[in-house]
Amino acid sequence: MVRSRKVVGLIWAVLVTAMVVVLIAFSRNRTDQVPRLPVISEISDFKLTNQFGLRVGKEDVSGYVLVVNVIFTRCPGQCHRLSQQMVELQRRIPPGSPVRLVSLTADPAYDSPEVLKKYGDRYGADGARWLFLTGDKAALYQLAMDGLKFSVVENDPKRATTLEDLFIHSASFALVDRSGRLRAMVQAEEANALDEVVRLTRLLSERNSQ
């Protein structure tokens, strides 16, 4: 009887060990199947000004996942739609998440901090989570085009038939990880664009951009 109990105990020990091995292997397999986002570019240091007139540099947003777009406040069409999408992202991304929304202006000569503050208020922007950045045009365009791979072109005012024609820029969202690296671009016109942005912010937050 004692020997029988020992045999049964040994069998159970072997079964439990086998189950643990299978679970570990399954877990590793699932982890390996999670796609790794490419590193598209490294964001250089920058010095810009937010809607409150405060200086903002790369070190101030370090440790946060950034969702970035390009707008300008005189744009009545595309920029309005992009800002409405940011409003929805602000609603869907939990306040406690390590995520910040950032809107760069293509029109710094007009979009002063005061103008951007009024624009943000119009959309109910939470100033602690959604930054509007202006500043030196060369610095803005370098960040937008070199670091974030946006297209931004100032049109000849004489050829612009509407305010929207003053600047031509990408209608997309750039996803930057906590280490200041561009990891993905999402086209705003895509039907599932916001779902994809939310998914990527979660991925970059939980996996710490690795």
Image (spheres, helix red, strand yellow):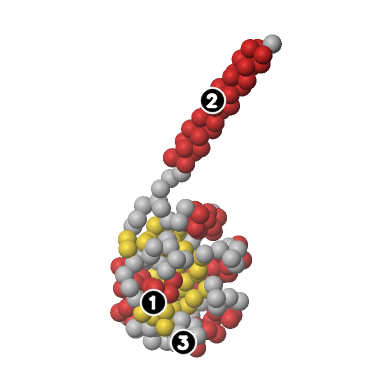
Q: To which residue does mark 1 refer?
A: 57
Q: Residue at x 30, y 79 (%)?
A: 138
Say which label, 1 or 2, has the lower sequence index. 2
Q: Quadrant of residue 4?
A: top right
Say which label, 3 or 2, has the lower sequence index. 2
Query: Quadrant of the image for the N terminus?
Result: top right
Give the CA separation, mark 1 to mark 2.
52 Å
Q: Is residue 3 above or below residue 100?
A: above
Task: Identify the secondary structure beneath mark 1.
Answer: strand
Give the CA separation, mark 1 to mark 3.
13 Å
Tell me if mark 2 has few (under 14), some (14-19) or many (20+) residues whose alpha carbon lies within 10 angstroms of its own. few
Tell me if mark 3 has few (under 14), some (14-19) or many (20+) residues whose alpha carbon lies within 10 angstroms of its own. some
In this view, the residue in front, 13 or 193, is 13
Q: To which residue does mark 3 refer?
A: 53
Q: Is residue 82 above or below residue 118?
A: above
Is residue 111 toward the left or the right of residue 91 in the image?
left
Q: Amino acid at mark 3?
A: Gly
* Circle 1 or circle 2, nearest the eye: 2
Q: Quadrant of residue 127?
A: bottom right
Q: To which residue does mark 2 refer?
A: 18
Q: Amino acid at mark 2?
A: Ala
Residue 197 lies, in percent from the top left, at 50, 58
* Circle 1 or circle 3, nearest the eye: 1
Task: Identify the secondary structure beneath mark 3.
Answer: loop
Tell me if mark 1 has few (under 14), some (14-19) or many (20+) residues whose alpha carbon lies within 10 angstroms of its own. some
User: Can see residue 61?
Assistant: yes
Q: Residue at x 39, y 57 (%)?
A: 183
Q: Is residue 121 above or below residue 42?
A: below
Q: Residue at x 49, y 83 (%)?
A: 51
